Image (spheres, rainbow, N blue to C red):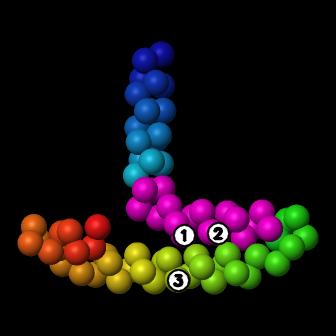
Amino acid sequence: MSEYIIITALIAVAAIGVFASFGDVIGNQTAAMAEEMAGGDGSANIQQAGQNATTATNRGNVQDTLSTYNAQN
């Protein structure tokens, strides 16, 4: 029984890590889907998700050191 709790906890930790890494993109995509399902236009949220994805990619390609860490955060 305790192994199920451990597996659930590991999945939760992994989900938190993914959401922390891609939170803005996931949030905007979810908002766009909700807007579209409600009959509205979600194109602004889709565009914002693309911009956030580009920003995340650019930040991921930058080599951080201790001397440049505060510049990005």
* Outermost right residue: 39
Q: Which residue is mark 3?
A: 51
The magenta span reads 18-35
Q: Position of residue 36 (x, y in %)?
A: 82, 71
Q: Secondary structure at mark 1?
A: helix
- The magenta stretch spans residue 26: yes
- Residue 16 lies left or right of residue 30; in this view the side is left
Q: Secondary structure at mark 2?
A: helix
Residue located at (48% from left, 32% from top): 8
Q: Which residue is mark 1?
A: 25
Q: Identify the mark nearer the N-term, 2 or 3.
A: 2
Q: Position of residue 2 (x, y in %)?
A: 43, 18
Residue 57, numbered circle = none
- The secondary structure that dominates the magenta segment is helix
Residue located at (47% from left, 64% from top): 22
Q: Tag 1: residue type?
A: Val
Q: Contact, CB < 8 Å: mark 2 with mark 3?
A: no
Marks 2 and 3, Cα distance to the nearest angstrom? Answer: 12 Å
Marks 2 and 1, Cα distance to the nearest angstrom? Answer: 6 Å
